[in-house]
Image (cartoon, rainbow, N blue to C red):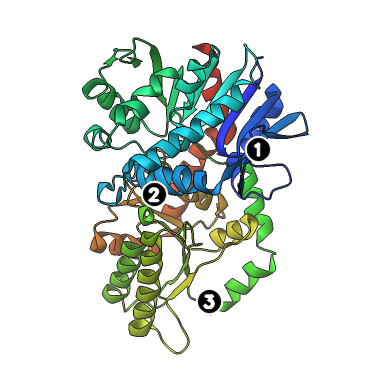
Amino acid sequence: MPRLVVVSNRVALPDESRAGGLAVALRAALAEHGGLWFGWSGKRVREPETKPAQQREDGITYCTLDLSRAEYDGYYAGFANRTLWPLLHFRLDLVEYSQETLQAYLAVNARFADALVKQLRNDDTVWVHDYHLFPLGALLRERGFAGRIGFFLHVPVPSSDMTAALPGHEALFGGLSAYDLVGLQTQRDVERLQDYVRLFAGGKVAANGRVTGRDGRRFRVAAYPISIDTAAIERQATDAMRRLPVRRLRESLSGHPLMIGVDRLDYSKGLVRRMRAFDEYLTRHANHADALTFLQIAPASRSDVSEYQRLRGSLEGLAGSINGRHAQPEWTPVRYVNRNFSHDVLTGFYRGASVGLVTPLRDGMNLVAKEYVASQDPDDPGVLVLSRFAGAAYELPQALLVNPYDLEGTAEAIARAATMPRAERRRRHAAMMETLRAHDITAWRRSFLEALQAG
């Protein structure tokens, strides 16, 4: 098999503790093929070295570049997170565009390409990840690399009209034709990208799904829904019930059933509407004998961006307002926490929660939804309330699917989840677990790489 080269914005170095299953899956793929992982070290320095740092462990070479503070501000904090992130999550109103940050984004991608191409062999297979690196495939082609290059987008694809609203969109999205395979989360994402290529990028879409770019290069676009290490999550959640934080949480509930939400603090996650929907549930169902306690874990992210600062303030105010109106001396309905927990503790929290509330306004997949399901006790499982605008909704139709913009509908789904009979809960859970076991993280990365090799 050819050597695999993974390229991502951040590299999960072997001595770093990473909660997510993606790093584990990519390491497994690299170990299986013998490989190189290339990307940003996570460090910001005054004057970065042009030559990447390298370390090797378990047959994998980790190759990283530092960013200067100016590069970080323009490429990462600027164009990637203030321009592309809101665009890709259907929030044109939040897009901040400037030529300065675009040029920084393109310059960092060019620096990555310059450093990476020196590490590549002619028969390498390159797998590029996410929106930070849209142009990398075209830049590698310009530098003479002719091997197979795949790209996987972890976030949603917006409608073609929205994509075309970005100044200079042709250079970014039209350049996807440099890849041999573009993987997206859902078939709906595939259709949106094909529409963009056909309507705005001067390309053609064939009946077999093959796409021809304006430059005449043919490539394939297909859905590869990312997943979790299902068996590992099952084991971890069972073991986690003995962990002290999990036991303390259960003891603190005083008999009230738990509803849980776990999200990075981000406007795409629908956290304000989620809080309001819970408020609506409490108002409509005040007669529930054992009203839910809602634990929302939302670690702060991108705290230097004003939109995120405003979001945090809004959520803190809402949590206080809901508690002020609905709390009893022995019961606080909302527990809002801005801190991280280890992954094993989180799976214990999931297992102890009667309801999992996952209601993003737009999400590429949302692995919390899958992890919540995999963490449940199959004999007495909880119920997943899931936004239909999350990619996971396509694979988990047995969840209670909701429109997160409909507060009343979400409130009624919460009430239904809290009172669902055990037999129905078990049927729904068993069907979702069948999907998650058949389509786990290993199946995801193998299916993508096999398709990339097949051409």
The residue located at (59%, 47%) in the rendering is: 20
Task: Give the secondary structure at mark 3.
Answer: loop
Mark 3 burial class by Cα count in 10 Å: few <14, some 14-19, many 20+: some
From the viewer's side, name the closer residue of 390 and 214. Answer: 214
- The mark nearer the N terminus, 1 or 2, is 1
Task: Tell me what residue is drawn at x 38 percent, y 81 percent.
Answer: 323
Instruction: Measuring from the top left, give residue 334's x and y in whole percent.
Output: 43, 74
Seen in the picture, residue 83 relative to 213 is either above or below; the reply is below
Crowding at mark 1 (Cα within 10 Å: few <14, some 14-19, many 20+): few
Residue position for label 1: 49
Query: Is residue 9 or residue 453 the one in the foreground?
Result: 9
340 relative position to 421: left or right = right
Residue depth check, mark 1 versus mark 2: number of the one nearer the observer: 1
Q: Residue at x 27, y 52 (%)?
A: 403
Q: Which residue is mark 2?
A: 399
Q: Position of residue 418 (x, y in %)?
A: 40, 65
In the shown orientation, is residue 47 left or right of residue 144? right
| Vertical position of residue 68 compared to residue 190: above or below | below
Counting residues from the start of the chain, the first of labels 3 and 2 encountered is 3
**Residue at image mark 3:** 253
SS at circle 2: loop
Q: Secondary structure at mark 1?
A: loop
